[in-house]
Each structure stands twice: as structure tokens, then as C-alpha cells.
Amino acid sequence: MSATLIDGKRIAEHFRERYKLQTAKLAAAGVVPGLAVVIVGDDPASQVYVRNKARACESIGIRSQVHALPSSISQAELIAFVQKLNADAEVHGILVQLPLPGHLDDRAVIESIALDKDVDGFHYANMGRLVIDESPFPPCTPYGVMQMLRHEGISVDGKHAVIIGRSNIVGKPQAMLMLKEGATVTICHSRTQGLAEHCRRADILVAAVGRANFVRGDWVKPGAVVIDVGINRLGDGTLCGDVHFAEASQVASAITPVPGGVGPMTIAMLLGNTLRAAARVRGLSIDEAGVA
């Protein structure tokens, strides 16, 4: 392997230590940050994600509430539940774990979250703010990618960033954040013609397509930085990303692993957004050196 490994687990721990100090400062000012996580149904992967988020909160002093609701809940009942959380002064951030059961409208539920508690950054208004560089809560996964690059001293200014994936959760907000930092951005997707050629022109390649080992080593420009957002479970139960790690790591200058790359940073940024939400509600400021 020639590429430098970008250890997301180590970097996330660095941020969590910062956030622990900030949580203590807020608590001393009479504000105990609170995050409410809503999970509907019994999807095993969602349950794992929710447990990990709850543990991360508890580890730095954030009050975590996990609300497990039955898959039979109606749209109106779920929205009414979210609105109760909106009115709860001890809840500063609300996260509805996606995906929801098929009979529920994800977008309508997300839109029912109060803007100042939308710590996932998925509300239409907060997504719009992201476009004009004013979002208080950048979506956690793409924001985690940016913080990871910054921590490793990898500048995107003037670089060509190619993003594979156009989802509202990763691809589109990742492009906005890259543009904000001065990158020239190309967004690719399933209908992009000559996809491999686009990838070979990338100084920074972000894969968020949801297909195991999709990006091969010969798609990577020598010396490029490769960020693998995907997480896929193979038939033998092992996890892998969207990038063929063994091949790409022989060509790239730096690369994230799966697991242990972007995933831990996503959770770390959720903690930071929750702290920011708690401070904003009380009119307090957060030291941006402590909360990224």
C-alpha cells in the first residue's frame, strides 16, 4: 500500500475530546445539550446506527433520548410526536433515523422538525442555507469529510473534486461544501457517460454511490485523495466501501478505509451540530476552535 491512510476513527476521537470540553462549558452555563433520536420500526442497521449515536452522546455529556416507535405508526402520529419534541425545551437537536417504513413520507417528516433543531441539516430551508454558505447545521457526512480533509492538511482550494453520487444526504451537500472551499466540482451519477474518465481527472475523488468495490484502481488519478463514503455488506458478512481499497490504495496519495473512515466522522459532526444548536437556543456562542 502506497497511500497514506486517513484514519477517521482517530480524527473523530480528536473532535469528540474537543466537544466534551465544550459540553462541560455549556453545562457550567446552565445548558445541558440534548439530542432526541427517533427510530421507527425494527430495521437492524438503523438500530445499530442509533445505538452508536446514543453512546457517542453519552460519552461527551450530551443528554440522549432514543424514541423507538412502532412501524405501524401513521404519518400524522409521527409528525405529532416530532412536534412534541420541537416544543420540549430540553431537546436541542432532533434526528429522525432514515429510512422510514414505506408508508411514511420521509420528506414530510423531516420538514416537521423545527429549523433550529434540525441537527442533521436535511430540512429544505437548511439545505437552501447550505447553498448560500449560511447553514448552521451542515449535513453530518459531507461536513465530516471536509473536517477530515482539513485535519489532515489536505486543501481543496483550486482542486478538481469529483463526487460520485447525487443524493440529498451526501452528494449534493458535499458539492456545495467543496465549492465553498474553492474546489471545482464535478458531480457524477448512474447515468454519467465516461464515468471512469471523469474520475481519472479528480484531485479529490469522493465515492458515495452505494455499490461495493465499484471504483477500481485504474479509475484513480495517481496521487489523488480518495474518500470512500460507501458502506456495503458482502455475502460473507464483511464490510467494504464503494472503492476497491486494495487497488486504489496503490495509486492514491491518501485514502479512507471502510470501516473506520468517514463513518466515525459522521457521528462526530452530529455531536458538534447538537452543541451548536444548544448554544444558539440560549443565545450563547461556541468557540469555533472547539466546535468545527
Image (cartoon, rainbow, N blue to C red):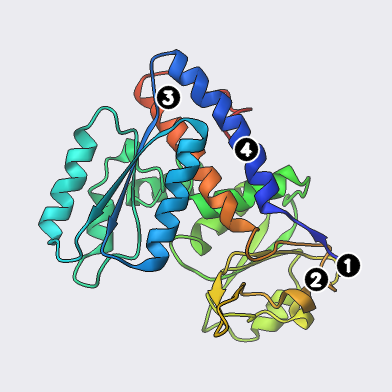
Alpha carbon of mark 4 to alpha carbon of mark 3: how far? 17 Å
Q: Residues within 10 Å of mark 4 (few under 14, many from 20)?
A: many
Q: Residues within 10 Å of mark 3 (few under 14, many from 20)?
A: many
Q: Residues within 10 Å of mark 2 (few under 14, many from 20)?
A: many
Task: Kindly indicate whether the residue at mark 2 contacts the one at mark 1 (C-beta within 8 angstroms).
Answer: yes
Residue placed under numbered mark 2 in the picture: 249
Q: Earlier in the sequence, mark 1 or mark 2?
A: 1
Identify which residue is drawn at 61% across, 75% down. Answer: 242
Under tag 4, what secondary structure?
A: helix
Where is the N terminus found, in terms of image quarters?
bottom right
Identify which residue is drawn at 51% across, 48% down. Answer: 267
Q: Position of residue 70 (x, y in %)?
A: 19, 61
Alpha carbon of mark 2 to alpha carbon of mark 3: how far? 41 Å
Q: Please state if 233 lies on the left or on the right of 126 as rendered.
A: right
Under tag 2, what secondary structure?
A: loop
Residue placed under numbered mark 1 in the picture: 2
Q: Earlier in the sequence, mark 2 or mark 4?
A: 4
Q: Earlier in the sequence, mark 2 or mark 3?
A: 2
Q: Earlier in the sequence, mark 3 or mark 1?
A: 1
Q: Position of residue 166 (x, y in %)?
A: 49, 69
Residue 15 has which mark? 4
Alpha carbon of mark 1 to alpha carbon of mark 2: how far? 6 Å
